[in-house]
Structure formats: structure tokens, C-alpha cells
Image (cartoon, rainbow, N blue to C red):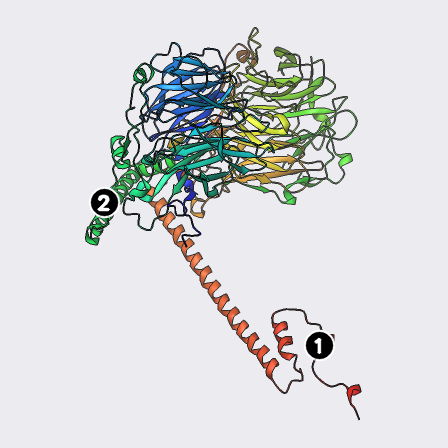
Amino acid sequence: MSKFVRDSQLRNLAVDGYSADEKFAELQAGDVATHGNLLAASPRYLAFVGTSNGSSAICALDVNEPGKYHGLNQSSCQQGGIYDLAFAPHGVDLLASGAGNGSVALWRASGTGRDVTLDAATTLGATNGARAHAVRWHPSAEAVLAVGRNAPSLEIWDANAESEPLVTIETGGKVLDAAWSPTGSFVASLVDDKSIKLFDPRQQGSSPTAAVEKAHLGPRALGRIVNGGASGHNDLEHMLYSTGFSMTRDRELAVWDARKLDTCLSRQKVASGGTGVLIPVMSPDLRILFVIGKGETSVRAYEATSAKPFMHSLSQTTNSSEPFMGVAALPPAACDIMGCEVNRLFKLSSSSIEPIRVEVPRRKKSFFHEELFPDAADLGAAAMTASEWWSEGKAVAQPMVPVRDMRASLGLGRERVLDERSDFAAVGAILAAEEASREEEEEEAQKAAKQDAEQASKASTSYEATELDKRMSRQRGYVPKFKFAKGTQAKRERTVYNLTVGPQPALAVGARRFAVPWHGGGGPVFVGDLETALGKIEKPERVPVLNGHTRPVFCVDLSPTDPEDRMLATGSDDCHIRVWRLPEDVAADPSEASSEDLAAHQSSVRHTVFHPSVANILASGSQDATVRVWDVNKASCVRVAHTGDEMITSIAWNYPGSLLASMDRANALRVTDPRAPDQDASPLSTKAHAGAKPCFVTWLGDSPYILSSGCARMGFREFSVWDARKTGEAPLNTTKVGQGATALEPLLVEDNGVVILTGRGENTFHVYEIETLTRAVVKPEHCGSSPLKPHQCQEFLARGDPTTAVALAPRRVCDLGGAEWARVLRLTPNSLEPVSFTIPRASDLASYFADDIYPDARTGEAASTDTEAWLAGQNFDPVLSSLNTSGAKTFSSRDPEEAHASLKRAQANTHRFKQQKAEEDARQKAQDDVFKRMQFMAVQHEAYNPNLSSGKAAVPQAIARSLGVAVDEEHIDTGDVEDDEWDD
């Protein structure tokens, strides 16, 4: 068999991903256009390029602390973005980063677990300001690194003397990548003219010691280069591996010998059709070369040799659908050596870092397999200092040390190694001791959990997470309470249909009434009752409407400070605003409604919004590019909050009504104090969203943060969270929500920090929970340091006609017993449909008031009617009251022991249901088997019964019928003799 199978211990190499629990999730990786390393790994830390305020930042993680992350410590002292990262090969904590402004920063990582931080140690100056995208550490000299820039030069730096580089080598082209030899005697550079040049930095002059002009013949100057590295084999230290493109635009991998660079030893086509750069990652100890395509999902592994064919393909594995943005390799000394893990790759995607396990399978994993882990280059102290290498001309490789000794010296732990000759009694004793230790730990954990539960039972108004909850939450990250929110459309008898809405649909909803523009001459508005107007409107052309405008109405709004919904504002294309005082039964005689005419705008009024807590204050936005504030009692404009050059597309009051946020047609976001006569007119963002479609804006509850919804380029819809206190800065975060024809309109449930987004002309409702915005009593302890990150919940798809307008009903009308946390009214071309959003609740919780989702809510009453006091600068918070009007026991005061017993009952019911289902399936299967046997016996009887005139074709015919195969009854040859066949 050895004649056909190559003799190699790596031929069964397995490349497989870890479980989902082992990955680093919910990250925000920076999408930087570079062929450098966006991810770096040391035996203890991971570093990747993230995003901070729209620019690049560096985030560090503990290799041994996977899980979901939010609120990472981000470090940045460079400008122009981060284009390359590299950990020093000596030690575990020194990191170098290259930036777009040409600077190279050195960082020190410290801390463990979730408390890893980066401290800037040194910043190397930029000699020519060109982007630094290739930072490569010397493999054996301390603090020496080569820096490749977007310029025709390669710099060699001594990090301890950051004033200027040791030498600047002229390469004749922009450096794409660089690689040191194991002793540092030469550095190889891959240049954008597709040439490979070798330089000895210690020789005077910039002439290369060896060069090949066209390493790759393709038209694209895109590639990487890596050295074979120092190992105990000593046969790959002169090998160079480069990636690039062939003449047919296929990506290829080439092998070179630095001693005779004029001849390529081998070329291998890697894949056709790919466009991303191929990243080679070398593991010199086992001579494994990994090749990963940026933007792809596969990992290709090769065994490198010093004889033909120089590369042997080992595997090609796809671990997940997320494409590679970057890759880094963990040294074998930090891998699971007792599990035969010879390497571990880390895959950087847009929102996670996934570990990839590289293993050589072995049957016995209780023993240390020395053949898989030869001596490796020491990761501790460097073999020589920078002055020894530079001034004295010393050239030595890193010493080779045993892997287990290296783990102990780096503080990575020492594995217990069993000799193969050890008796099984000793092995059994060790395993028994481990089992006893695990049982003791579990018993201690149970005691701690019980003590935490007893302490929690003593509290009456708050919930304290147990230590077990805290550990689980740190592992899983933030779990949205409304993740499984369910949307339900009301039945037909609870909807209003047969409407004839006007040409510019708009909707206002209160606790009792709703208002919509109506079809007809001028600008009629129909006001209906949410209880009595349900069902079909018999004669829509004869319904009583409000008539006060001469042109179509664009916007309507009911006052949130009027519990009876008797104050309505309408804005029209006739440049006028009318504020209506509605009678008790407006549907019976709308002529009894009185109105005030507010006229000051010079163009169409597009938005009217009442003050959230002070009565008789109204804000309006117009096509004349102004935002005005009105005193309804005086029917006068008291302030012009903003004057610009573009029409206003959205306005919103903050929680107490002290600030106004506005968005104009150029997507400029502004925050103004409507009571200040002179204020800075500079926008919070001159271009909140890059798309051309109109945007929406809303405040995130009682906080200084704003949510804007719009479109990016190419029609991608998105929403961003802004800090209103920081003018001119990038948003805190931006979330993409697919593509569509219009921007998504946000509806904020301020009590729970949940935003519901939907677009006009669509039927999909997207639900996102924003961390730390909830005002509920029961609050997870682990969400205190959240960066207001949105978490997607279950979306809802409505049936029927497309949506033309939406509005959120007041919280006090929700069905508290049914766990309804939001009610949205959806306007279509001919109907008004309520959509109820609920969360699942156990039946035994029906008797409790859910204070975890129902904090104190607005009563609908005005906090003040003194408009003059508000205009003078006094603020009034909205009037809040508890929704627990019946005095029921609250969910937060529930006895933890009772909750535990309820959980046990639920688990028992689930187990009983599964058992009953399994028994039912078993009975059904037994019944089906009996019928099959009976059918088979019937077929046999028909086939072999001599009293049945079926002829010789009966057997195949019966079998065919039993198998359900069609039989041609007319052309069956039965073997019988027909009358005309008789021969007298």
C-alpha cells in the first residue's frame, strides 16, 4: 500500500471548526481595504482592527476567553486607519500596528479574561507619510522590525530608538509584503511590479543581493510572501512562498529558493475565479503551509518539502459561510497538545473571530505524541539584541526548545503526561481524582447558587443576578428580552376597513381616536373612534369630515397631553396649520369642532408634532426649510428653531421636550434648543446617511441619544445611533437592515428601549432591542456597560395590502394580561389594522404584574399648561404612573423558590409530552408494520393461488401493484390461448 500512499504523518490532517461556544462573537470588525493583517495572535492575546466612531481602532482579547462581547476596550493613537497588525515573536504582549498616516505604534497588552487592555508604549514616526501596511518583526533580534509602505522603500527600525529608522532601502516600487529569513541575514520584499528582491539591511547601499523580475505574470499587483521559517528540520529556511496571479488571472502559489532565486521551483494554481489576495501562513515545525483567500471561506493546507514537487496538498475545508477578512495562527505551544492539535487558526469575519482546529488524529490522546510536536523556536527571549545584529553583524536563529518546556516558561500550564508504559491503575486513579474534584466544584457551585437565591428572595423590589447567572451572561453576552417577540394582526371585526384615504397618507393615533387625511376636495380629515368606528364604513363618501384646508393635508398629530384626544393638529400644502378642538362625538357633527389657524410658513407644511409634556406647544417642519415652535393658545409662532437651505423631512422632541432634533432633505441632522434665541446652527452630522432617500429621526427615550433611519449607497437601508452631545462625530453604531425602495420609519417603545421599523409600501416590521435603554425594574446585571448596541429580534410580516403609514398607540391601552408590550396601527389604502406585539409568558405568571416590561408609563396628562414658564427655560418631565392599577403582585417580588418549582414543573411537563409523543410514534409505526405485512401476504396469495386466472404474468403484475408501479393492463401477456389461435 505504501507504493500508492505517500508516507507522511500529515496525510490525515483534519481542519475543522470549534463549536459556536468557542468563538468570539458580537464584535465590530473594521472593514479596511488592505492586504495586510487585520488580525494578530500571540500565545495569550488576540488583537484585531475594530471600529470606533467611524474610524479604525485596535481591540485585544484573551485567547482563552471566548464568548459574546460588547463594550470592548478600544485603543487608537493613530490617524488614517489601521492597516496591519503583528505581535512580536518574543514574548506574548508586544504588538505593532501600521496606520494610514505612516506611523507605527507599539502597544503592550495586559490583563486576563474580559479585562484585557492595550497601552501605547511607543510611536515610530512616519518618514514620508506613506501608509504602513506591512509590519514584520525580526525573528531572532529584539525590537527590530521592517516596515513596508505604500512607497518605493523598505525601512528597518530599532523600536528602542524611535527617532529615525536604522536604514531605508530603496526597492524600486511600492512594497506589498516582506519576509525575514530565520537568522535575519536577508529580508525578502514583494514589490508592486511583481518582483521579489532580497536585501541585506546591514550592507551599505540599496542593491538587492538577489532578485527575480516577474515572480508572477498576472496583470494584478496583489500578493503576499512568507519564509519557510526556522525549525528542527533545517531544510526550509531558504524557501520562500509567494502568492499572486498568473497570466490567465488565476491565483497561484509559487515556491522559491533564496539561494537561486532566478528559477521558480514550483507553481501551483490555487483557485480560478477568485479576486481576493491569498494569505500564506507557515507553520515551520511540521512544515504545514496554510493558504487562505481573503473574502473566501476555505482553508487549504499543504505539506512543504525541500524536494520535488515541493508542495503536497493535504486538505481543503470550508468551516462556515462567513468569509475571511483576516487570519492569524496560534503557535503550537499554545494549542491543545494533549488533544493532538498541532495548529489553531483564527478567522476574522465582520462580527466574530472563529477558531479553527488543525489536528493530526491519534487514537490515544492521553499520551503526549512527541512526533507531532518537535522542538520549536523559543517564544521567550530573543537570541540577540538589536545592536548585536546591526552593529556586530551577528546572524543566529532562535534556539529550539521543547514545546512542553516552552509552555511552562510562558505560563501556559504544564500538561500531565502519561508514559505509555504506565499501568492502568495509575490512569484510573488520576481519572477518579479528577471526577472527585469535579463533584466538589459542582457541590460548591450549587451551595453558592442556593445562597444567592436566598438573598434574592429577601429583596422585594429588585432582582439580583446570581453568580451563575453572571457567569452565563458573560459567556453568552447580552440576551434580548424581546428576542422572541411575536406580532399578531387583529381579526377583521377589530379593524376599520372600506376607507378612502387621501393622496398623501398620514396617521395619528391616540388612546381613543385616530385621524387620517380623507379623499376629496381641499384637505378633509376623518377622525374616528377606535371602539365605535370598527368594522366597515358603509358610505365613505358621506362620512363627516373636518374641512379647514384648501389643499391636501400632509400631516396629522393628536396631542399626547390630552387624555380625551380632543386636540388635533393638521398641516397642509396650503402652508397653513390648523389646531382643532374636537367635541365629544366628532363623528356625529364635525361642524362643532373649532380650530385655530397658524400661518407663518412660506411653503407646504410636512410635519406637526405636539410637545410631549407641556400643553399647547406645537413644533412644525416645512418645505421652506424652517422648524417653527407655536403657542397654540395665542395662535402665534414664538420661535424659529432652525432655518436652513433644505426642506425638513423629520422632527422629534426629546423626552422632557427641551430639545428638538430635525433632519433635512440633504440628510443633515441637527439638534436645537427651540427656546434659545441665538445658538450654534452647526449640524450634529452634515450627512447622517449617504443615500438620497429622505431620513427619519427619533430620540431614544430619556437619554441624550438619537436614532436616525435612512439609506446608504446602493439602496441599503440602515439606522444609526448618535450622541447628541458630540457635534461632528461619527455615530456610535450603524446597523444595516437589507435593501428597499424607501427608508424605514422608526417607532420607539421608550419604556423598553425597543424600536420597530417598517417602510412604506411594505409589510415587514423589523424589531430591534437597544441595550441599556429599558426603564423596567427587572434589569439584567450584565448590560450596564453596553454601547447602545441594537439586537435584532423576531421580525413580523403582515398580511394584506402594503403599509402606507404607521403609528404607535399609547402604552396605557395595551393588554397587560396578554403581555402586549406594543400596539401598532397600520394604515393601508383602504383599512386601518391594529398589530399587537407580545412576548411569550408561562401560564403560571398570569397572576403577576409584569413589571419587567411595564414600568411607569405616561398618563396622557400635561405636566404643565404654563407655556410662558416653558419658554422662559423651565423644563417639565412627563407625568408617569404605574400601570398596575389592580394592585397585583409584581413579577420582581416573586419568590425564587416558587420560580424554581415552576421551572421544574415545566420541565416535567415537557418530558411527559415528549414521552407521550414517542409512545404515539411507536404505536403508529407498529400499526404501519402490521398493514405492510398483511398487504404482502395478500400479494403472495394473488400471485400463487391456482384458482385465480391471472396467468404466468401474475407474479410480476402483483408485485408491481404492491410497489405502486403503473401496470399496462391492455398489453399484459397472460399466456392464455385466444380463440383465433386454435388450429383444427
Up the image or down, 150 lies above or below 826; here it is: above
Q: Is residue 82 left or right of residue 193?
A: left
**Residue picked out by circle 2:** 437
What residue is at 33 percent from the left and 14 percent from the top?
160
Up the image or down, 211 lies above or below 291; here it is: above
**Marks 2 and 1: which is nearer the front?**
1
- For the residues labelled 2 and 1, the Cα–Cα distance comes to 77 Å
Q: Quadrant of residue 845?
A: top left
Q: Is residue 824 left or right of residue 404?
A: right
Q: Quadrant of residue 78?
A: top left
What residue is at 73 percent from the left and 86 percent from the top?
977
Q: Can the viewer see residue 566?
A: no
The spot of residue 573 in percent (x, y) is: 73, 20
Q: Nearer the viewer, residue 548 or 671?
A: 671
Q: Amino acid at mark 2?
A: Ser
**Residue picked out by circle 1:** 972
Q: Can the viewer see residue 146?
A: yes
Q: Amino acid at mark 1?
A: Ile
Q: Nearer the viewer, residue 950 or 328?
A: 328
Q: Secondary structure at mark 1?
A: loop
Q: Is residue 806 left or right of residue 873?
A: right
Q: Mark on residue 8?
A: none
The spot of residue 349 in percent (x, y) is: 48, 33
Up the image or down, 855 lies above or below 653; here it is: below
The quadrant the N terminus occupies is bottom left
